[in-house]
Image (cartoon, coloured by chain):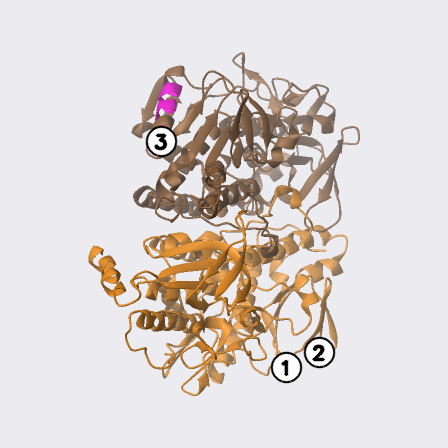
Chain colours: A brown, B orange
């Protein structure tokens, strides 16, 4: 690629020769990485700022949380991913605030160095979303969400410890053991469905011979959804099939069910008290605070209302993309999914490249909907690809191939494929570790 | 295997028909698991108590600490390993004390259940060893040791964060960046040698293109050994070859070098102040407190002085094995290595099986030394197998095969082999994650 690397130098003459424009990208997720990639040959200097040193393939995070895969199988160091991109550097830091007047991003360093300030000519905010507890942030302690590798390890620990504690309690306090063997997943979107299906398989298959006092297969798994349907983004007939598969896996799917409170011992759902020691939050998301940083107008979920070219009104050099942005395409809101974030990242990078090289900017952002997929346990998925609707084994194979294809790196692809094959044939889960930050932090997680 | 599972029932008639003898094994390491395995067909009930839910293949722990492998690649759930052993159960708990008069083990539960007491007829203590700071336990904070998965993740974080912090400091404070790029490994045994070699390869190969302000290849790696030689357990000529290989990797091997103090900013070695932000402790080990629990006589390293049949004087039903025991074989002390622990575990299990079935007990424990291996970076190892001494590539291949062979489980073997091949050809490290217990624990580790 040497010829292509020389390319930007030729184009750089079209901008100010002394000043290489600074592009700061906050967030090394799907959107941020695609934006950086689109700028790899542009005459700019790119700085990617992230709180983690690694990019995470979020669609498979639930498989880490349910002990099927290791964290490193679905993630990679951001530095390594952009290693060959000479115009790009990576900073491990947390944004504290942004001064849009001075065009500077202020950060808190996370490597133990000093807090630095990064000036920008162009800014791309791609900071994603986090779980929303609809004003009940105190529930987060009892019902963790799933957004980071740390979240996944914490949920894995919580789920595995619940079986351990139930084994110990069975003879002394069967009621407590029952509460320990009750798992509630709140939220019937793809993450909630995949999580509930995976927990059911852990209990029914992987752990079934491992205990002497409890029968893990007797575990109760509930999927609680406030709306009348799960998987609202899918055609209703497909969602019904997914629901049927969940029920065959022994998941108790509760529709029109509102979670009214959550505490250490269970939840109140539609007025009914449900004793449950493990509650996982896969319901609403709210955008990261990027909108607050730049004082921009946001929708009720905290997403920045951006213009059709993904810039912020009155800030033509600030782009907001991915789950942090609210934008329409073909008159419909662009969904908060990985392909949308990637397309928006590529688009933002192209707009910047056009501007710094004096080329005409592309037209407004158009979302190309490649389709939707959701899997329910082994051998079953549902898929919508254009006008095609699939369910069952063929959709599951499609799901497998698509996820393998979008994983970054040959190593991760082989590791994930092998472990899926191994799990498929053995019914086992390969990453059943209960780990802590330090060994002396062993604190009972399941009270 | 149904015929073999029926077998113990036949033999059970030879013991008291009402009472199935209770065997409590503390520790699910190499020794404890082998003991349990030797008892799989014996007419006893076995309880394995461990602080972790997983068995760890400790000889490869340094590869987790240096980002080559994931924790789950070298470990497996103890429950899963003994799943098919119907007479065995597993408890996630920490021993608090032992009453040898009442024959009871008292534990603190780690799953969030209640603290239980386990009566025993036979007790096997296989609790291993931990790092010894020779009376300077305050050094542990600055110079972590490597015994558990948690230790390995903490060291991985510390090493990776040091490069991140150096990148940020390079332009502001090059002296601080230099201290951040100085890695000191204390202890020239196999673990220290392997760790120093692996850090050198991370710096010289894996990270070399990932930074923009520092040159990771310029990192200083020191291996500090108080004795005049590294790898004292090997013939001197082989140890010299390993030292030569370390030096070719750019490791500064300091012999006759005493660590006089350790703090957050470096170490005092032979009166010389060495600024270094990352210090790893691979020096002395001391036995776990099993000797204190039973009030037994111990050697200065805390190992219980056991009789030739591995029982404790005056306690013929208590066995101490592995790194926790001090015993001689062929007039020589049995070394604190995995094969010795495994052989002792099998032996203890056989003695118990003979006693409960009324068979004659085997003679005193005899250690069969299969040989020793140590690896230094890629493509180089040293090996002693009987009278055969090997070094270089052929020893490295031997090292690979032996480690793959002793890994538990098909899954782990394939994962480790694939990742070694990938690392070998790409010079990369696949598990370069900086992770924390919870996302909000992001605390600068390198000050």
Q: Chain of mark 3?
A: A
Q: Is residue A412 left or right of residue B409?
A: right
Upstream in sequence: badge 2 or badge 1: 1
**Is B384 above or below relative to B20?**
below
**What is the distance, in whole Å, between disc 3 and disc 1 at their CAs?**
64 Å
Please give the chain letter of the residue carrying mark 2.
Answer: B
Name the mark on residue B270.
Answer: 2
Furthest toward the right, the residue is A102
Front label number (3 vs 1): 3
Say whether mark 2 and mark 3 are on the same chain.
no
Question: Mark 3 sits on what residue?
Answer: A249
Furthest-left residue in this view: B3
Q: In the rendered image, is residue B52 in sight?
A: no
Tell me where the magenta segment starts and ends, as one range.
A238-245
Our reading of the magenta stretch's main secondary structure is helix
Whether residue B269 is visible: yes
- Mark 3, secondary structure of its residue: loop
In the picture, measured across the screen, residue B19 lies left or right of residue A183, that is: left
What is the chain identity of the residue bearing mark 1? B
Tell me what residue is drawn at x 43 percent, y 71 percent.
B341
Asked where in the image residue A130 lies, by quadrant, the reply is top right
**Residue drawn at x 73%, y 39% as measured from the top left:** A18
Does A242 appear in magenta?
yes
Element class at badge 2: loop
Q: Which residue is mark 1?
A: B256
Above or below A150: residue A303: above
Circle nearer the viewer, 3 or 2: 3
Q: Which mark is drawn over residue B10?
A: none
Mark 3 and mark 1 residues within 8 Å of each other at the beta carbon: no
């Amino acid at each position: 690629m040497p010829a292509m690397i020389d390319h930007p130098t030729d184009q750089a003459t079209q901008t100010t020769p002394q000043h290489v424009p600074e592009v700061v990208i906050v967030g090394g997720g799907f959107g941020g990485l695609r934006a950086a990639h689109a700028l790899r040959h542009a005459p700019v200097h790119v700085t990617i700022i992230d709180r983690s040193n690694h990019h995470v393939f979020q669609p498979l995070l639930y498989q880490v949380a349910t002990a099927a895969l290791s964290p490193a199988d679905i993630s990679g160091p951001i530095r390594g991913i952009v290693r060959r991109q000479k115009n790009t550097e990576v900073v491990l830091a947390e944004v504290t605030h942004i001064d849009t007047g001075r065009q500077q991003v202020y950060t808190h360093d996370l490597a133990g160095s000093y807090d630095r300030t990064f000036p920008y000519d162009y800014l791309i905010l791609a900071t994603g979303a986090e779980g929303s507890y609809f004003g009940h942030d105190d529930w987060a302690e009892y019902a963790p969400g799933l957004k980071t590798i740390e979240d996944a390890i914490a949920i894995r620990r919580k789920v595995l410890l619940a079986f351990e504690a139930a084994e110990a309690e069975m003879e002394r306090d069967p009621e407590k053991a029952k509460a320990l063997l009750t798992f509630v997943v709140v939220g019937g979107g793809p993450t909630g469905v995949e999580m509930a299906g995976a927990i059911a398989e852990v209990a029914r298959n992987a752990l079934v011979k491992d205990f002497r006092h409890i029968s893990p297969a007797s575990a109760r798994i509930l999927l609680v959804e406030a709306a009348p349907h799960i998987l609202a983004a899918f055609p209703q007939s497909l969602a019904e099939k997914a629901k049927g598969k969940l029920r065959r896996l022994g998941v108790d799917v509760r529709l029109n069910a509102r979670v009214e409170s959550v505490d250490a011992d269970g939840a109140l759902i539609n007025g009914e008290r449900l004793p449950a020691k493990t509650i996982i939050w896969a319901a609403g998301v709210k955008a990261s605070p990027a909108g607050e940083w730049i004082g921009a107008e946001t929708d009720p979920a905290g997403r920045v209302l951006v213009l059709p070219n993904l810039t912020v009104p009155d800030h033509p050099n600030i782009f907001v993309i991915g789950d942090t942005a609210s934008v329409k395409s073909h008159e419909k809101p662009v969904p908060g999914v990985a392909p949308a974030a990637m397309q928006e990242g590529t688009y933002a990078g192209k707009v910047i490249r056009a501007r710094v090289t004096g080329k005409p900017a592309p037209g407004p952002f158009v979302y190309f909907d490649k389709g939707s997929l959701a899997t329910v346990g082994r051998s079953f998925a549902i898929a919508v690809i254009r006008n095609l609707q699939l369910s069952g084994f063929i959709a599951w194979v499609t799901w497998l191939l698509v996820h393998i294809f979008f994983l970054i790196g040959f190593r991760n692809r082989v590791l994930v494929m092998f472990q899926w094959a191994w799990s498929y044939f053995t019914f086992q889960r390969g990453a059943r570790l209960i780990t802590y930050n330090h060994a002396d932090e062993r604190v009972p997680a399941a009270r």
